[in-house]
Image (cartoon, rainbow, N blue to C red):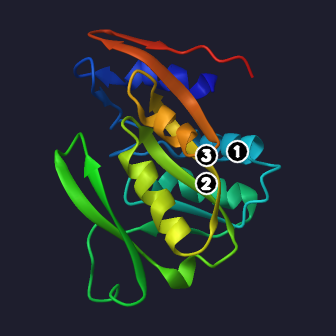
Amino acid sequence: MKQLKDKIREEGRALSDQVLKVDAFLNHQVDPVLMQAIGKEFAERFKDAQIDRIVTLESSGIAPAMMAALEMGVPFVFARKRKSLTLQDDLVEADVYSFTKQETNRISLSRRFVLPGERVLVIDDFLANGEAALGLTQLVEAAGAEIAGVGIVIEKSFQPGRDKLIERGYRVESLARVAKLEKDHISFVEVVR
């Protein structure tokens, strides 16, 4: 997705050879025009997948998931990283390790919002080691639904997340695939669509 790659080049920062900072438009401040384009792109890529619902993880997955859900005309739900007083009963849960935060969170989702037999699209902001996406797929499958695909806004292709998801048989669509991070330079995997 050229618009996203351009935005990463212009406003993203490689903090190291492992960490890409995109807080100017994705995971702190959000660019709504870009999110709308991302939603349209996900809708186009998964138009034949018969999506019933979208599932994401709070908080950075919410904006792209909401825009994709709006484009597809389906509901979306986000998994919570921490339980609240109102989220206690009939949950599916999974442990997810965050590389950037260096912590494990027990994510949870109410079975009320992911129904058995639904075809679910998982959307996440980043794919690196695959922990968040795999945790979300575990929740969806534990609720009795089927994974129709995994949509990723930015994939760090030099890390093993994509391979882990594909090994489990999931279709993965990443809108921007980063090949390498260097100071003052971000290169992309060129994919012919």
Going by the image, does 51 lie left or right of 58?
right
| Quadrant location of the C terminus in the rendered image | top right
From this viewpoint, is residue 91 visible?
yes
Q: Are marks 1 and 2 in contact (CB under 8 Å)?
A: yes
Vertical relation: 80 (above or below) 132: below
Label of residue 67 in the image: 2
Q: Name the residue carrying label 3.
A: 170
Q: Is residue 152 above or below residue 55?
A: above
Cα distance between the residues tagged 1 and 2: 8 Å
The residue tagged with tag 2: helix, strand or loop? Answer: helix
Marks 3 and 1, Cα distance to the nearest angstrom? 21 Å
Q: Quadrant of residue 10?
A: top left
Please tell me how crowded label 3 is: few (under 14), some (14-19), or many (20+) other residues with Cα within 10 Å: some
Dividing the picture into quadrants, the one containing residue 13 is: top left
Q: Quadrant of residue 79?
A: bottom left
Tell me what residue is drawn at x 23 percent, y 22 percent.
Answer: 15
Q: On the image, numbered disc 1 is attached to which residue?
A: 40
Q: Residue at x 35, y 35 (%)?
A: 24
Q: Amino acid at mark 2?
A: Met
Q: Is residue 80 left or right of residue 74?
A: left
Relative to 44, residue 121 above or below: below
The type of residue carrying mark 1 is: Lys
